[in-house]
Amino acid sequence: MNLRVFPDKDSLARAAAEQAATAIRNAITERGCARIIAATGASQFEFLDELTKARHVDWTKVEMFHLDEYVNMPPTHPASFRKYLRERLIGKVSITRFHLLDGERDAREVIAEITTEIRKATIDVAFVGIGENGHLAFNDPPADFETEEAYMVVDLDEPCRRQQLGEGWFKSLDEVPRRALSMSVRQILKARQIIAVVPDARKARAVANCLQGSISPMAPASILRTHPNTSIYLDKDSAALLKPEIISSAAV
């Protein structure tokens, strides 16, 4: 695990985007295309903004997969992750090959279709975040570390739902959906490279639990420590509860 800590979320975003763009360019050079997984949420705003400004990335050779989406969420809703990705990534760089999760359709059909596509070749780089409850994608604790399914329908716990409310996507907790489609933990770990972008003080407790506690389904993102090529980007606020010896080992 490569841990990097930055003074603020803007410098974090620039560095993470530089690594992400390099990974995409390298994949295109080596294999003719780059297959990526894109994360959403307020914590990814600055990162995606920097990534879409990266130079010399041939986005016509990029194929993008979607991490998660709410069940029964129309793409016009402000909280729709399909809407988010179209506005903050796909539309900005004109990605033509992308696979978005349609939470309004029959979940079994959606999962079967996207599973067929994602299993055609290895993902080159996955962009992820860590939730306030330690979730990875929408795999809330206790996460399923064993399933080999690429995607599944999951129940969202209250801390996860409160995070979505706190980020301003919904007007009340009752409006936050209780179920979602989510990429599985094992599918995320199949990526050649994982880049986790985790700014903000509200993530500090989850970061500490996942990076210095035991690897456990109760701290879902702790599983990232088992991946041979994971980079975790923190700012000083999200790193605030880490032990000094962990901070001292981090690159800046």
Image: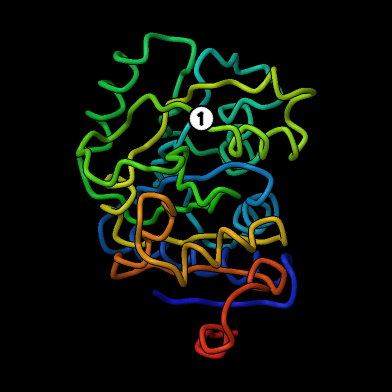
**Residue at 63% over, 33% down:** 84
**Residue at 74% over, 25% down:** 170
93 relative to 155, above or below = below
- Secondary structure beneath disc 1? loop
Q: Amino acid at mark 1?
A: Leu
**Residue at 38% over, 56% down:** 125
Residue 250, horizontal then vertical, whole percent: 53, 84
Q: In the rendered image, which quarter is residue 16 located in?
A: bottom right
Image quadrant holding the C terminus, namely bottom right
Residue 26 appears left or right of 18: left
Residue 233 appears left or right of 174: left
Residue 74, horizontal then vertical, whole percent: 60, 14
Give the residue pinned by disc 1: 156
Residue 119 appears left or right of 139: left
Category of crowding for the residue at label 1, using alpha-carbon neighbours closer than 10 angstroms: few (below 14), some (14–19), many (at least 20): some
Image quadrant holding the N terminus, namely bottom left
**Residue at 58% over, 42% down:** 40
33 relative to 81, above or below = below
181 relative to 201, above or below = above
Marker count (numbered): 1
Of the pair 59 and 123, the residue shown nearer to us? 123
84 relative to 42, above or below = above
Residue 48, horizontal then vertical, whole percent: 62, 51
Residue 224, horizontal then vertical, whole percent: 37, 61
How is the model colour-coded? rainbow
Of the pair 60 and 231, the residue shown nearer to us? 231
